[in-house]
Image (tube, helix red, strand yellow):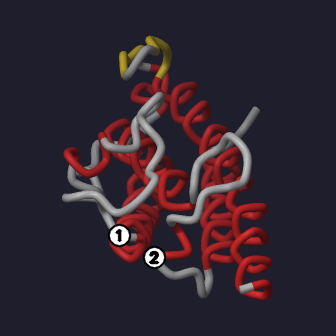
Amino acid sequence: MLTMHGFITSLERNALNVRTHLAGVNHPEALLQPPYRGNCILWIMGHIMCYRNYMLELAGQAPALPQPQASRFARDSAPVLADEPGLATLDVLLAAFEESQTSLVDALPRLTSDQLAEVVSQDAFTMPRGDLLLIRLRHEAYHAGQLEWLREMVLALRQSG
């Protein structure tokens, strides 16, 4: 069974992966599209933040990224192909990510067993809060892993161009 300590350790590992994969990447590079079906770094990071907001809500915290910006990156949203009016920049997304990390690491240990067991509804899910938090954590880990190959694409394009 995953303990809260283990959950936070996994959350911190996700954060380390995000920071490592995006170190030195700039906003124009974050908009580069993979040469096959997939999303750019900016969409992936925005999607992570959309779901971080869900985790924050489950932990009783305020969103780190304003909802109008976060909703741009919701499940099944259109790919980001270029800058758009109102689109969050990579710097904005990374700052919101760091804010969410601090808030979650602070708030999660204060959740009681009863709160974690409480059945809640969010998005398309109805289940115990703790289970939903775990689903959100696993979802984030998947997308944080995508940032590795997108960073490699950016580095390869830097060398070739």
Residue 142 x %, y %: 70, 44
Residue at the far front: name it: 161
Q: Please say if the residues under marks 1 and 2 sit with CB atoms less than 8 Å apart.
A: yes
Residue 59: x, y in percent? Answer: 37, 43
- Where is residue 32 shown, x and y percent of the image? 58, 65
For the question of whether residue 109 can be seen, the reply is no
| Residue at 46% over, 53% down | 81
Q: Quadrant of residue 34?
A: bottom right
Q: Nearer the viewer, residue 64 or 149?
A: 149
Pointer 1: what residue?
89
Q: Is residue 104 above or below residue 159?
A: above
Quickly name the residue at label 2. 27
Q: Residue at 49%, 52% (x, y): give it.
A: 43
Residue positioned 51% across, 81% down in the render: 26
Q: Where is residue 94, by image quadrant?
A: bottom left
Q: Is residue 99 visible?
A: yes
Q: Is residue 38 left or right of residue 73?
A: right
In which quadrant is the N terminus drawn?
top right
Count residues near mark 2 (Cα–Cα under 10 Å), then give few for <14, some for 14-19, many for 20+.
some
Q: In the visual, does 12 lie left or right of 47? A: right
Residue drawn at x 33%, y 71% as measured from the top left: 92
Q: Position of residue 84 (x, y in %)?
A: 28, 58
Secondary structure under tag 1 reads loop
Side of 111 where 12 appears, left or right: right
Q: Disc 1 marks which amino acid? A: Thr
Q: Earlier in the sequence, mark 1 or mark 2?
A: 2
